[in-house]
Every structure is written in structure tokens, then in C-alpha cells.
Amino acid sequence: MQSVVLVTFAITALGAILLAGRIRHLRLPPVLRDTMASAGQFPVRLAVFLAVSFALAGQHLGLDLVLGAFVAGAVLRALMPADLHHDLMTRLSAVGYGFLIPIFFVTSGMKLDIASMVHSPMALALVPVFVLMMLGARWLPVLWLYRNILSMRQRFALALHSGTQLPLVVEIAAIAVERGEMPDWCSASLVLAAVITLMVFPALASIVIRDRAAGQS
């Protein structure tokens, strides 16, 4: 049943993208262009409307919200004239980084169930293990892929920056708990480990690069 729903959603999304490409050549694009720099900001409002609509449609069908938002972006790209893509991305980035992403981190903090970890020694013991796993998952590929391009210090700093995992881990843990595939204490361990990577890894990377710069000077 889930496969049928997914295929139906994919066909509907493809149809919406093709329809948006046809609408692009009608009278709507001038409206988008004329209001891009005005106070109305119709393209931004349209982007928010499409994201919410497709996300709710996906959730109603039992799919993840992210999938619906992704389809909304594809539809919006097909609908918007090519010369407006950069301007719209700049405005959406301002909305995302200035408003929505901070809310995401607030909700991430609310999902961190410290109480469940206090009563589970295993949960506390797994935190450093998860941190090392998150670093190792990015460290080894970076060391290998950039071995002829970057120095060892630069590769180590890049691996530390790449090892920050909070957004992805929060979503994966939330889905796993919701579906009953992961206990709450394990989810809390994962999220706490991801928070540690976000707090510690960039600082360590800055120290590594700063020490290298000081040594060269």
C-alpha cells in the first residue's frame, strides 16, 4: 500500500512540475517579475504556499514532510523564469536562516529528552561513541578524496566541519521513534551527540587552521 501511495505522489508531483513549466509561458511570469522587488513579495508568498501545500499533502498520504517540500521547490523552479531564480533564492535564504532554521533548532532542543538519559547508563555511554562515528563517517572520505589537494591539517579541519550532523540526525531519530524503531533514550543519545558535534567540531577546526596559520607566519 505504501508503495502505491509513493508512486501516486511521484506521478502527481511530476504532473505538477510539467504543468508549472507550461504556466511559465503564460501571463503569470510577468506578475512574478513585477512583484519580486515590491512590498508584496508574491514569489516568496507563492514559495511558502507551495511548500506548505505539498508538505501537508505528503503528510496526509503518510509521507515525510521533507519530500513534499522538495517537490514544492521543483515546481517553483519550473514555474519561475530562469533570471529570477537567484533573487528568489536570496530572499528564501533570508527567511530560512533568519526565521525558520532558528525555530528548527528550538524544536531540536525540545526533543532532547535528558531525563530519559539520566536513567539509562547505556544512553550516556553511547554519546561519545556516536560522536566518534559521526566524525569517522566524514573523516575517512575527506582524508582519501582530498589527499592530493589539501594538507593533513586542512583535511582534518574539513572533516571536523563536515562532521556536524544535527539537522539530519534530528530528523532520522524523530522518524525512527515515531515508527517505533528506536527507543527514546537512544534518540536522545543521538541528538545529544549531534549537538556536541555542532558545538565542538567547528571550534576544533578553527584551532587547527589557526595553529597552521601561526606556524606559517
Image (spheres, rainbow, N blue to C red):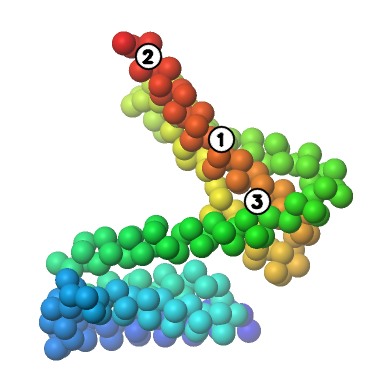
Task: Look at 65% across and 51% down and name the residue there.
Answer: 191
Q: Gap between marks 2 and 1, in whole Å?
A: 21 Å
Q: Is residue 80 left or right of residue 190?
A: left
Under circle 1, the secondary element is helix
Q: Is residue 155 visible?
A: yes
**Cα distance between the residues tagged 3 and 2:** 35 Å
Residue that label 2 marks: 214
Name the disc covering residue 29, or none: none
Residue found at x 64% / y 35%:
132
The extreme front residue here reads 39
Instruction: Quadrant for the C terminus, please.
Output: top left
- Look at mark 1 in the image and give the residue it sits on: 200
x and y, in percent, of residue 120 in the image: 85, 48
Question: How many residues crowd around disc 3 within 10 Å: few (fewer than 14), some, or many (20 or more)?
Answer: many
Structural crowding at the residue carrying mark 2, measured as other residues with C-alpha within 10 Å and reported as few (<14), some (14–19) or many (≥20): few
Using the rendered view, name the quadrant where residue 187 is placed: bottom right
Q: Residue 162 appears at what percent x and percent y?
A: 47, 40
Please identify the quarter of the rendering in which residue 206 is found. Answer: top left
In the picture, measured across the screen, residue 87 lies left or right of residue 111, that is left
Q: Which is in the foreground here, disc 3 or disc 2?
A: 2
Q: What type is the residue that disc 2 sits on?
A: Ala
Tag 3 and tag 2, C-beta contact below 8 Å: no
Name which of mark 2 and mark 1 comes first in the sequence: 1
Where 31 sits versus 80, above or below?
A: below
